[in-house]
Structure formats: structure tokens, C-alpha cells
Amino acid sequence: DQQVKQNSPSLSVQEGRISILNCDYTNSMFDYFLWYKKYPAEGPTFLISISSIKDKNEDGRFTVFLNKSAKHLSLHIVPSQPGDSAVYFCAASSTGFQKLVFGTGTRLLVSP
Amino acid sequence: EPEVTQTPSHQVTQMGQEVILRCVPISNHLYFYWYRQILGQKVEFLVSFYNNEISEKSEIFDDQFSVERPDGSNFTLKIRSTKLEDSAMYFCASSGGSGGGGGTDTQYFGPGTRLTVL
């Protein structure tokens, strides 16, 4: 099941710079997208979401961009901080269905 | 801030034994979910629960699995006869229901129970 893909298993960024995490999906029925952050031995923590009727949603240092024609979304973190170091999961859902479909995650390392 | 809690944090069991994983969802939420993550793999949906019944389940959620909301606060996942391949992190989640349990409904996750089947 490769409906949601995160092709970069890891990303290293310096503190203060921009982190860009990418996610691609194949199911055109997906209409809600979420980003979760996960530390070891903890559950996924909700970060930000976007509905398919929008192409951008911003919350503080986090911005999610959605390109429906390309079936691509990205999470921008500006400025990146060492505390942002974690695994980031992209997830998608469809109206009328409860399940979230997750990507494989991208491990972000922000170095001081 | 309200959060989802799960107990135990780690459960070790022998193959063939029954286990019950427990969750306390966020108190005013209406939809409840179980997911699992086998080591090195994706987080996978197992089941969703609304209004005291299963509303959606995956092909993983076979007859060995069951869910229950035994009272107003707890939500449990039972695995009747555990197999080695059931070893995984099991995450409970809940959502408010404003998006009908799907669509725009954000799911909030607990810290997980690590199940080890020997």
C-alpha cells in the first residue's frame, strides 16, 4: 500500500534554516492532509493540517503547501530549531472514511 | 491540555495468550481509533469506533481482534490469541467528530503500548 509516500527517509538542516519535508500521494479521493511529529517512544503529535480546498495553511513556524494537480504536499519549518528533530509523518484521509493513511516518515535532524 | 492516555506502556506476552490494551480517549471526543506500527514499518490503521460500534476496519483487523468501550471513559483493544507478528506499537487515537469522523476530523494519538509476543 503506497498511497502516501515520503521519499526522503532523512533530512539534516542547520538551526535557523528552513526545513522542507515532502510527501506525495496517489489516491485522488484524499481530501484532508495532516502532518504529525513523532519522538521515540511517544505517539504521533498533531502539527498542522490542510483541506483540499486550500493550497496553503500556516501556523507559526509551520506552513503546509498542497499542490493537488501534482498530488504533492510539503511542510516548511522556518526557522528550524534543534527541538524540531524528530520523525515527521504525512497522513491523508477521505471524507466519509475514518482511517488515516500514513507515509513512512522522514527523520529530521536540526543541528545547532 | 487534554490528552489520550494508554496503559500499559509495555506488554510482554506468550504466543497464544490473550492481551487487552487500554486507552482513555480525550473526554469529549466521539470517535476512537486503534493503529499499530510494526518496527521499521508505517503506522497502519486497524479500526475506528463510533456510537458503540465499529465504523470502519482494515483487513488486518480480523476475528482475533475486538474493541470495546466498557464504560464512559475507557476504550480497549483485545487480541484473543497473540501471534509473533502481532508484536508492534499499538496507538490509540480519538477525534472530536466535528468532521464526521473522517474528512476534516483531526485525530489525536496516545503514547502507545509496545506489545512483545514471545
Image (cartoon, rainbow, N blue to C red):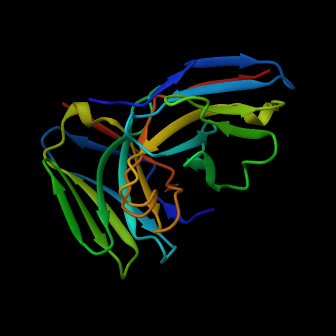
Query: Image check: B22 left or right of B67?
Result: left
Residue A28, given in percent of the width and then of the height, sits at 48, 78
Where is residue B80? Give x, y as percent.
81, 31
Residue B1, percent across and down? 26, 29
Tell me the residue at 31%/35% (across/down). A85
Residue B83 appears in the rendering: yes
The spot of residue A39 in percent (x, y) is 39, 31
**B105 or A70, nearer to the observer:** B105
Please tell me whether residue A86 is drawn above or below residue B106 in the rendered image.
above
In the image, what residue occupies the spot 57% across and 47% down? B49
Q: Quadrant of residue B68?
A: top right
Front residue of this view, candidates B18 and A89 = B18
Count of number-bearing discs: 0
Q: Which corner quadrant of the image does residue A32 belong to?
A: bottom left
| Residue depicted at x 20% and y 40% | A14
Q: Quadrant of the C terminus of chain A?
A: top left
Q: Quadrant of residue A99?
A: bottom right
